[in-house]
Image: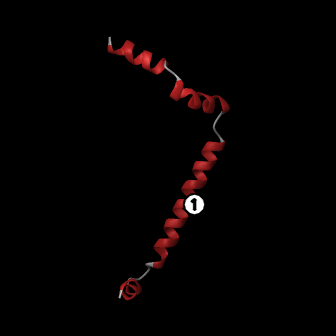
Amino acid sequence: MLRDVFNSIGGFESYGLISMIIFVAFFAMLILHTISLKKKDVETFGRMPLDDSSKESDKNQDS
């Protein structure tokens, strides 16, 4: 029954192809962006969870 409903909808098979193309394009752009990051930025991002300077600046802004 479900197969008959899907077969009666014209162009339904193209949705899978379009969604796969969008996914692959997004994933490729994400990889290219990650590769193009500067080493200094990556090191900064890596230290962020352990860095307490953001907490100190938040305390200074509250005063």
Residue at 38%, 12% (x, y): give it.
60
Observer-nearest residue: 15 or 51? Answer: 51
Residue at 57%, 54% (x, y): give it.
27
> Residue 47 location in percent, x, y?
57, 27
Residue at 57%, 49% (x, y): give it.
30
Which amino acid, mark 1?
Val
Occupied quadrant, residue 1:
bottom left
Residue positioned most to the left = 63
> Residue 52 location in percent, x, y?
49, 19
Observer-nearest residue: 13 or 42? Answer: 42
**Residue occupied by mark 1:** 24
> Residue 44 location in percent, x, y?
59, 28
Vertically, is 55 above or below 15? above
**Helix, strand or loop status at disc 1:** helix
Number of numbered callouts drawn: 1
> Residue 22 location in percent, x, y?
52, 61
Vertically, is 59 above or below 44? above
Vertically, is 17 above or below 28? below
Instruction: Identify the image quadrant of the C terminus.
Output: top left
Occupied quadrant, residue 6:
bottom left
Residue count near mark 1 (Cα–Cα under 10 Å), binned few <14, some 14–19, many ≥20 = few
Residue positioned most to the front = 50
Q: Is residue 6 left or right of residue 41?
A: left
Q: How is the image coloured?
A: secondary structure
